Image (cartoon, rainbow, N blue to C red):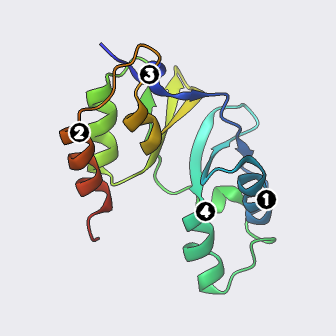
Amino acid sequence: MTTARDIMHTGAQCIRADQTLAEAAMMMRDMNVGALPICGDDQKLKGIITDRDIVIRCIAEGKNPADMMAMDMAGHLHCVRAEDSMDTVLKKMEQHQIRRIPVIDGDRLVGMISEADLAMGHRNGQRLTDQQIIEFMDSVYMMR
């Protein structure tokens, strides 16, 4: 069985809950990513922030990203456990229409899974079927 641990990217870098959205945007730019997990001082996962969150929920509403903290954008957190199956990962991402999901082991962040990770599969060469990819894309990218 392919698990979340098999397909995740390890070494996900967190932004601290007390860092600004401007800092989050610079980190995303420098790491060439579209989302950052938010961690507290205890290094436990508290939320996730996306580039879209910064644009839609901060800038477009006339707020200053230098004044808003990452935790202000945390919202509801969806994540998977490292031992969850690929089917579980897919279902959760489809159900919540999300393109990236944090992976936890216990209460600690151990990686991230993106839509590209799903399509590429894992080190043993197992990947989603073309039909699974189509269903995932239809579900995640459908009009809201």
Q: Determine the secondary structure under disc 1.
A: helix
Query: Where does the image place residue 52, in percent across and percent down from the top left?
Result: 55, 66
Inspect the image, locate mark 3, and give the three-letter code of the amino acid beneath it. Answer: His
Q: Mark 3 and mark 4: span between their CA atoms?
A: 26 Å
Inspect the image, locate mark 2, and give the three-letter code of the amino acid beneath it. Answer: Asp
In the image shown, does 56 or 86 lie closer to the viewer? 86
Q: Mark 4 and mark 1: span between their CA atoms?
A: 10 Å
Mark 2 and mark 4 lie on one chain; the one further toward the N terminus is: 4
Inspect the image, locate mark 1, and give the three-letter code of the amino acid beneath it. Answer: Met
Q: Alpha-carbon neighbours of circle 3 within 10 Å: few (<14), some, or many (≥20)?
A: some
Q: Alpha-carbon neighbours of circle 2 within 10 Å: few (<14), some, or many (≥20)?
A: few
Left or right: 48 in relation to 43:
left
Inspect the image, locate mark 4, and give the three-letter code of the amino acid beneath it. Answer: Asp
- What residue is disc 3 on? 122
- What residue is disc 4 on? 51
- What residue is disc 1 on? 26
